[in-house]
Image: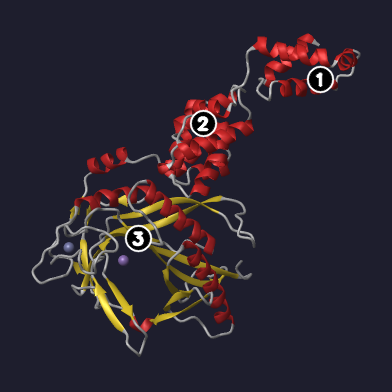
Amino acid sequence: MIKDGWEAVIGMEVHAQLATATKIFCACPVQTGGEPNSNTCPVCLGLPGALPVLNKRVIDLGARAALALGLEIQETSVFARKNYFYPDLPKGYQISQYDKPFSANGKLTIMTAERDEHGHAMEWRPMTIHVERMHLEEDAGKNVHEGLPDVDRYSYIDLNRAGTPLGEIVTAPDFRTSWQAYDYVNHIRRVLQWVGASEADMEKGNLRCEANVSVRKVGETAYNNKVELKNLNSVRFMQKAIEFEIERQIAAHESGEGVVQETRLWDEKNNRTRIMRSKEDAHDYRYFPEPDLQAVKVTRDFIEAVKREMPELPDVMRDRFMEVYGLSYPDASQIVANKDFADYFETVARITANPRLSANWVLGEFTRELNSAGRQVRDSLMPAEDLAELLTILSTGSINNNQAKEVLSEMFATGKTAPDVIKEKGFEQVSDTGEIERFVDEVMAANQANVDAYRGGNDKLFGFFVGQVMKASEGKANPKIVNEILRSKL
Ligand code: ZN
Ligand code: MN
């Protein structure tokens, strides 16, 4: 919660690694780990005379990402040199894009909610974000530090990551709370994964977030000094860092101390932000067009072709599930959490023609099994068709709910089909009316006094007879048929 009379102004910059097999300007493989400096060549080592060649796949995936984020792909974009000196940047400049980015003018609608003190979402509402641009660029290498500072500290440079393709996604300062920023990053993370543009895994470092945070009095339109928050390696830490920073800045303004424009880091141990570098280190990047690369020209036809190949986006799918299948907003949202899961649900729903039952089981028992086995939908042994078959059997009433749960568990563990498991477990119900009639006759003969009482008007005894027949059949009689036969005989 932000102190009364104040508001926060937050803009986000996200670097997403595009999921190509090779680097952006050379044929070196993109892979994590491996012997330091083994995935390198003269181009990504920045050796004199080596020339970059643009990887076409970067444009394909960049286009998917741009469309998924509501951005307009620009007809012409230009790579530019961003000059700065840092050990992990072998050429002394990064090939990026500046005044002519690959995509711009994005409008993206996300769902967002404030959270109560327990972190539970309150009311989900749509919010439209202005995504200013997504430009394409190469990643730098990594500095690796070992040993104790001032004792035997060594620094190494590993250029395996140098030249990995990135999309840098920049928003306008549209966010007013840390949770909006949190919901935004989760939104883009999912959507980038969904369209296959990026693995977008913050832990692996292939999605990296920076937040620009300032505060001002409500009603003011000018911006105060902002702080750039970096090295945020989870969405939750990012949210905490923003929250901390908002409070810190309000206090600094109120005490008259003021806020210094600087870069700060999240200190996980002490639950606070701390300074990384001040504005004096600010760079003048002296951008100019990269002379070794041609401008990127994108045709209408290309964009249309990418659009045709794109899967239905998660929010569109969520709304369709609500409309076509009558699912609630929370259920539909949960189902579109990832694409495999959503496709799984839809296959089950189509086969069973019972979307609510399908949603209940996919979100309930199936999810429980996935979670407890630590598995993803794609490595589940139970295909959607098999779950649909189980639910179809359940709907006929020939097994009950608890039996179905037990059957599902076994199917999930072994990959067997529903009819096989039902047979093995002896859950097959007796639906043969002749057989059930015999049970009913037995029970009536053995309980003549109760039969008389029931016929004398004691309706409550009906349940007793159902119970007795079920017991006589060892629980296997189809309850529906038992009911019908009992009614006619009594
Ligand atoms: Zn290379
Ligand atoms: Mn960048």
Q: CA distance from mark 2 to mark 1?
A: 41 Å
The secondary element bearing badge 3 is classed as loop
Q: Nearer the viewer, mark 3 or mark 2?
A: 3
What is the x, y in percent for residue 184?
46, 56
Q: Which residue is mark 2?
A: 324
Question: Callout 2: 10 Å neighbours few (<14), some, many (20+)?
Answer: few
Verify CB contact (< 8 Å) between mark 3 and mark 1. no
Q: Nearer the viewer, mark 3 or mark 1?
A: 1
**Residue that appears at 27% across and 52% down:** 74
Q: Which residue is mark 3?
A: 206
Dot 3 or dot 2: first in sequence order is 3
The quarter of the image holding the N terminus is bottom right
Vertical placement of residue 380 versus 20, above or below: above
Q: Quadrant of residue 451?
A: top right
Question: Callout 3: 10 Å neighbours few (<14), some, many (20+)?
Answer: some
Confirm whether residue 260 shows in the render: yes
What is the x, y in percent for residue 293?
14, 60
Closer to us: 295 or 484: 484
The quarter of the image holding the C terminus is top right
Q: Which mark is residue 462?
A: 1
Q: Is residue 446 left or right of residue 200?
A: right
Closer to us: 389 or 328: 389
